[in-house]
């Protein structure tokens, strides 16, 4: 169902149309026969399982992001040429993104293969609404929400 459409004029004098759609989704009824896997995403580890098993997947995402942050900061202070600095920053940004994406892909494959193996009908991810109420936890909220539900 079409919800809303907006025309947006950007600074580059191009005109864009933003369109939003909505769709009714029927949720799975949960009863005693349904097998569910719960997923808990943290900065350096993803823990998933149910009452029969619990498994841990080390991501080391925080370590990777910190290393690339320090590398980018060093590049910004040491290199004076704008073009070279921009080129190197883009290079390391892309490299970091590819490494993180590969980790997400491996984790999702492992969780889904385990779900298929045990015959799970649903995968449930945590709801972190408690952090939205606390203004001091914006940084923590950003760290935890890097792995989006849609990407999974």
Image (cartoon, rainbow, N blue to C red):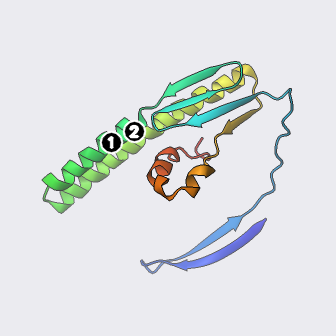
* Residue 115 relative to residue 121: left or right: left
SS of the residue at dot 1? helix
Question: What residue is pinned by disc 1?
Answer: 66
> Which residue is rendered at x = 36% and y = 37% of the image?
64
Q: Quadrant of the N terminus?
A: bottom right
Q: Decide: is 5 above or below 101.
A: below
Residue at 62 percent across and 51 percent down: it is: 129
- Residue 33 at x, y percent in the picture: 86, 26
Counting from the top left corner in percent of width and height, residue 30 is at: 84, 36
The residue closer to the viewer here, 134 or 146, is 134
Q: Is residue 52 left or right of residue 96?
A: right
Please identify the quarter of the rendering in which residue 32 is found: top right
Q: Quadrant of the C terminus?
A: top right
Count up the numbered dots: 2
Q: Label 1: few (<14), some or many (≥20) within 10 Å?
A: few
Where does residue 27 sit, x and y in percent of width and height?
82, 45
Find the distance from the CA under tag 1 to the CA under tag 2: 6 Å
Q: Name the element at disc 2.
A: helix
**Residue that mark 2 sits on:** 62
Q: Are marks 1 and 2 in contact (CB under 8 Å)?
A: yes
Does residue 148 lie above or below 81 as drawn? above
């Amino acid at each position: 169902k079409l919800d809303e459409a907006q025309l947006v004029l950007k600074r580059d004098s191009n005109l864009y149309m933003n369109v939003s759609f909505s769709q009714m989704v029927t949720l799975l009824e949960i009863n005693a026969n349904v097998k569910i896997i719960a997923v808990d995403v943290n900065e350096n580890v993803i823990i998933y399982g149910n009452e029969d098993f619990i498994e841990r997947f080390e991501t080391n995402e925080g370590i990777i992001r910190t290393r690339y942050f320090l590398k980018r900061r060093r590049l910004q202070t040491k290199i004076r040429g704008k073009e070279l600095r921009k080129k190197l920053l883009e290079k390391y940004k892309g490299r970091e993104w590819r490494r993180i994406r590969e980790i997400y892909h491996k984790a999702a494959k492992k969780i889904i293969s385990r779900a298929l193996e045990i015959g799970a009908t649903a995968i449930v991810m945590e709801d972190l609404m408690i952090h939205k109420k606390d203004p001091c936890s914006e940084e923590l909220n950003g760290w935890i929400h890097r792995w989006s539900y849609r990407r999974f």
